[in-house]
Amino acid sequence: MPVTRRTVLEELAALSDAERQETTTVEALSSALEADEHAVEAHLNGLEACELARIDSDGRARVTITGEELLELDTDGMAVIDPTTPDAER
């Protein structure tokens, strides 16, 4: 089964904590999801662009408070979130 951005966000929230700034690794996420590391890393980069995840300079990642709040909404449907760009705010 292919990994989705949502499943990566859910697992990231399970393995990290925004308030305590606890982080996890791409390897741990990939293992927990039984998914390819490159696919997980690509989803993490997308989540970071949308401010739902933070990736440290050493590659460790954590969910953001915004990411946790999005998951708490427990939406059954799809939510589309695009990264903000300077041009989009004009």
Image: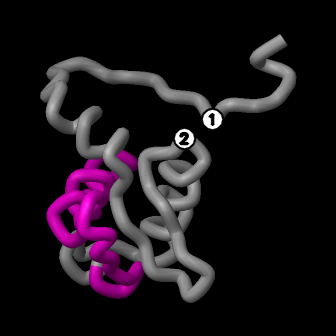
Q: Is 46 left or right of 30, judged from the image as shown?
A: right
Residue 66: say if magenta.
no
The dot on residue 66 is: none
Please determine whether, in this image, residue 14 is positioned above or below residue 82.
below
> Which residue in the protein does label 2 denote?
50
Mark 1 near mark 2, Cβ–Cβ under 8 Å?
Answer: yes
* Residue at 44% in and 55% down: 53
**Quadrant housing the C terminus:** top right
* Residue at 32% in and 70% down: 21
The dot on residue 83 is: 1
Colour scheme shown = one colour
Q: How many marks?
A: 2
In-front residue for pair 21/46: 21
* Residue at 37% in and 52% down: 64
| Residue farthest toward the front in the current orientation of the protein | 20
Label 2: which secondary element: loop
Label 1: which secondary element: loop
| Residue type, mark 1 in image | Pro
**Quadrant housing the N terminus:** bottom left
Q: Position of residue 55 (x, y in %)?
A: 52, 69
| Quarter of the image where one finds residue 57 | bottom right
* Residue at 18% in and 26% down: 73
Q: Position of residue 29 (x, y in %)?
A: 30, 75
In-front residue for pair 87/79: 87
Residue 3 appears anywhere in the view: no
In-front residue for pair 85/1: 85
Q: Is 73 left or right of 79, judged from the image as shown?
A: left
